[in-house]
Image (tube, helix red, strand yellow):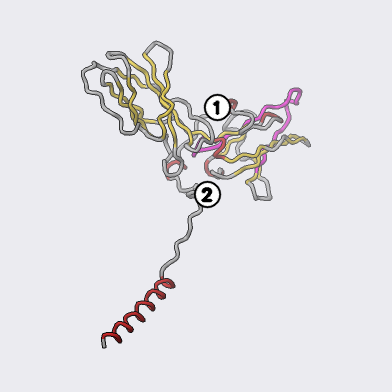
Amino acid sequence: MAGMLNYYFLIWAVIMRISGRHLAPKATPQDPNDRPSPTVLGAAQTQPCPAPEELTTWCPTLNPSAGASSSLHLRCLVLYPKCMSCHWTPQDGAASNTTFHLRYKRRGVTEAEECKDYVTSGPNSCYFSRTNLCLYLTYEIWVEAGNQMSEKLIVNTEDIAKTEPPEGLKATGFGTHFSVEWGYPPGVAASYFPLVFELQYQEQGSGEWEQEPDVGEQTSYYVYDVKPDTVYLLAVRCKNSDGKGFWSDWSTPVTVSSGQATAKPVQSQAQ
């Protein structure tokens, strides 16, 4: 009898195991290149972009090998996640009444589109608002004037992106070291666009900045070996953690007194 029970139990176990294989849901492998939807950015979509004069200050700083074409010196920069601005320089001798048309298309799309805003970023420019900008994708961009056409600028928006400076920078002095904290730039989330940071500081009035380049992705840091009872200026900047794009501008410096050398130094667990 016991032998028969063991036999039936074995048959039941085999049936359940086979059934489990067919009934269990299959896990869908995640493509490491998958990106979160660029439209799910919350308030970042409604925040205004910098004024035209601010946009034109950082466009000329582009490396010609990334984000610029030689003909007409066409260059573009993305202020992530708000907008993109492209600028070009008319060639010497071009008539003042020459009409330029910037055209673009996303990689894989057949039909080109024309710039929708030639005004916001100033003369010889095209402004892409967040509503007509697709992040994380590759664009082909060029300028036409009569029967002339510039070289095509082929760039992925990540390769020409920078953010606004980090915000909320604050520091506390402990005599011989500082505790420094800051937050992500407005509209940027670590889950979508992780950043790395650099910190710089100087004695007030010295004009000589010292940098802490190995801050990494953390948003707090300790600066050691500072002078007690001394006023310092501190600033921070950021960049895409995968190395693409450009550093943000430095944040507005904050002032902090190191204080008296009476507090016990606090060891940073993040370093």
Disc 2 element? loop
Residue flagged by tag 2: what amino acid is it? Asn
Closest to the observer: 7 or 230?
A: 7
Look at 42% across and 22% down and name the residue there: 211
Question: Is disc 2 surrounded by few (<14), some (14 to 19) or many (20+) residues within 10 Å?
Answer: few
Q: Residue furthest bottom?
A: 1
Expressed as whole percent of the image width and height from the top left, the position of residue 270 reads 34, 33
Residues marked 2 and 1 touching at CB (< 8 Å): no
Q: Amino acid at mark 1?
A: Trp
Single out the residue that lies furthest toward the front.
3
Residue receiving disc 2: 33
* Residue at 22 percent of width and 23 percent of height: 264
Chief SS of the magenta region: loop
- Horizontal side, residue 186 vs residue 58: left or right: left
Query: In the figure, residue 78 lies in which quadrant?
Result: top right
Question: Start and end of the magenta stretch?
Answer: 79-104
From the viewer's perspective, is 102 left or right of 271? Answer: right
At 43% from the left edge and 12% from the top edge, which residue is drawn?
207
Q: Residue 58: which numbered mark, if any?
A: 1
Instruction: State the SS at label 1.
Output: helix
Give the residue drawn at x 22%, y 21%.
263
Q: Is residue 1 magenta?
A: no
Q: From the image, state whether disc 2 or disc 1 is nearer to you.
A: 2
Q: Say whether residue 94 is magenta.
A: yes
Q: Residues within 10 Å of mark 1 (few under 14, many from 20)?
A: some
The image quadrant where one finds the C terminus is top left
Residue 197 position, x and y percent, is 43, 31
